[in-house]
Amino acid sequence: MVAFDSLLIQSPKRSLKVPRGWDGFFPYYAGYPESFARALLKSADLPRDAIVLDPWNGSGTTTFSASQLGLASRGFDLNPVMIVIARARLLSPSEADSLEPLARDSVKGVRADSRVVQPNDPLLWWFSPSTAALIRSLERRIRAQLVGGRTLNANGVRLDHISGLAATFYVALFSVCRQLAAPFRSSNPTWLRKPKVDEELISATREAILSAFVTSVKNMADALAHRAVESQTDHTTAELQLADTSLTSLAEASADIVLTSPPYCTRIDYSAATRIELAVMQPLVEVEIEDLRRQMIGSTRVPDHHIEVDAAWGPTCCHFIATLKTHPSKASSGYYYKTHVDYFEKMARSLANISCGLKPTGAAILVVQDSYYKDIHNDLPGIITEMAAAAGLLLRRRDDFEFKRSMAGINPHTRIYKRAAGAVEAVLCFEKS
Ligand SMILES: C[S@@+](CC[C@H](N)C(=O)[O-])C[C@H]1O[C@@H](n2cnc3c(N)ncnc32)[C@H](O)[C@@H]1O
């Protein structure tokens, strides 16, 4: 049983500085810093055989922190890119020395082979045919050398089996492609747009791409080697699974503690943010990006079926939705109403699954940020507290951290409405009842 009063809860706010070292390779809209997760898990004083669960694992801050403490963990995410990223993050420091020689070996003889690029290859969205062919040929080499039959076989892909080495090489290639595609990144840091019809596509020479790849792997190896010595990654297991947590039951009553941050309710398109990585990974796992966008919690797509507001979501949620629906601004009663209802319905189902996945004495810690829809306060911490209660999770402690900039503040159009200046990031601690 977790002693809630003894939990060490630091600010979950991420520094605005570009992350450095090992963390610098995983700057994927993480919900909270690794130092926050590690201090919290350590203070929970869990038994040695405890299981830590993150149902929205993202770049894997929770599973990484658990491993550093020698705790077994399970992480779920709907986006295949995040499974690869979270797996790479878990690479043992003992592998650091073999990374660069392996990368040099992998690039040997790689040439732009146009036969490996299918006409529908999504790399062609950003890259010229010869550059796409080179990137695909390098990806193919990584796949042939490091991805085995346990991950990819005739029955499909089992990303939960991908090795740390393969994942690390994919992350290095993601990083090269992100750098090359930088001109298509917009002011919204999570958005990578597709080029317009008449826009020039990205071209780079074979030497430039292959040497950027080796450099990227080398930088990862250096950062890995410098990681804190107290890391216990070598001795612990982390299971990472591709799953929709609003639809999947999470291994009933198995987790001692959940530590997570749910997807924001501020129209962040998590799948569009990883478009280029999904394009690189396409031969491993063919994702229909539109399906993925629709499935995501916080989807910007209108659901394809009608969803009723459910009183069980709690009074704060129902009041927020009713106020939003009658807001005079354009599309409030249509698009925005539907996408918000979709968010809350998926959230309610996910919380029920999370509750189910916890042991009877388990605890769940959720880091949740509030936001605004126009001038209406979206008290997401309050809404999630009520929804969690309906799922059998009772709030035992809440720590609020205020700060100036929220993810909602990224959109300049939101500035015309009057709102409270700060955002609140709440750390909500629940006990299974
Ligand atoms: C706020 S991020 C989590 C950040 C994470 N704490 C980290 O360290 O990076 C939310 C994550 O939820 C995932 N997600 C969204 N909808 C999902 C769903 N239905 N099932 C599983 N994961 C989902 C997104 O892909 C995203 O990675």
Image (cartoon, rainbow, N blue to C red):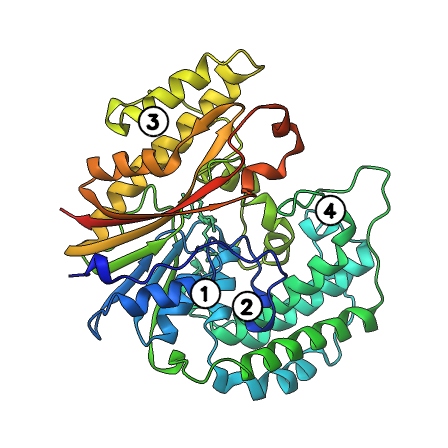
Secondary structure at numbered mark 2: helix
Q: Pointer 1: residues within 10 angstroms few (<14), some, or many (20+)?
A: many
Amino acid at pointer 1:
Glu
Q: In which quarter of the image is the N terminus?
A: bottom left
For disc 3, the marked residue is 317
Mark nearer the viewer, 4 or 2: 2
Residue at the image position 28 percent from the left and 42 percent from the top: 351
Residue 170 in the image: above or below residue 274: below
Residue bearing the label numbered 4: 125
Mark 4 is surrounded, within 10 Å at the Cα level, by few (under 14), some (14 to 19) or many (20 or more) other residues, namely some
Residue at the image point whose x is 13% and y is 46% from the top: 433
- The image position of residue 393, as x and y in percent, is 20, 44
Between 429 and 241, which is closer to the camera in this rendering? 429
Read off the residue under disc 1: 34
Q: What residue type is labelled 2?
A: Asp
Instruction: Give the numbered dot on residue 385.
Output: none
In space, the residues marked 4 and 3 are separated at their CA atoms by: 40 Å
Q: Which amino acid does label 3 sit on?
A: Cys
Per the image, the residue denoted by label 2 is: 23
* Mark 3 Cα shell of 10 Å, populated few (<14), some (14-19), many (≥20): many
Question: In whole angstroms, how far apart are the C-alphas of marks 3 and 2?
Answer: 35 Å
Q: Closer to the N terminus: mark 4 or mark 1?
A: 1
Where residue 355 appears, as percent x and y from the top left, is 22, 47
Lateral position of residue 222 relative to residue 355, left or right: right
Label 4 element class: helix
- CB atoms of marks 4 and 3 within 8 Å: no
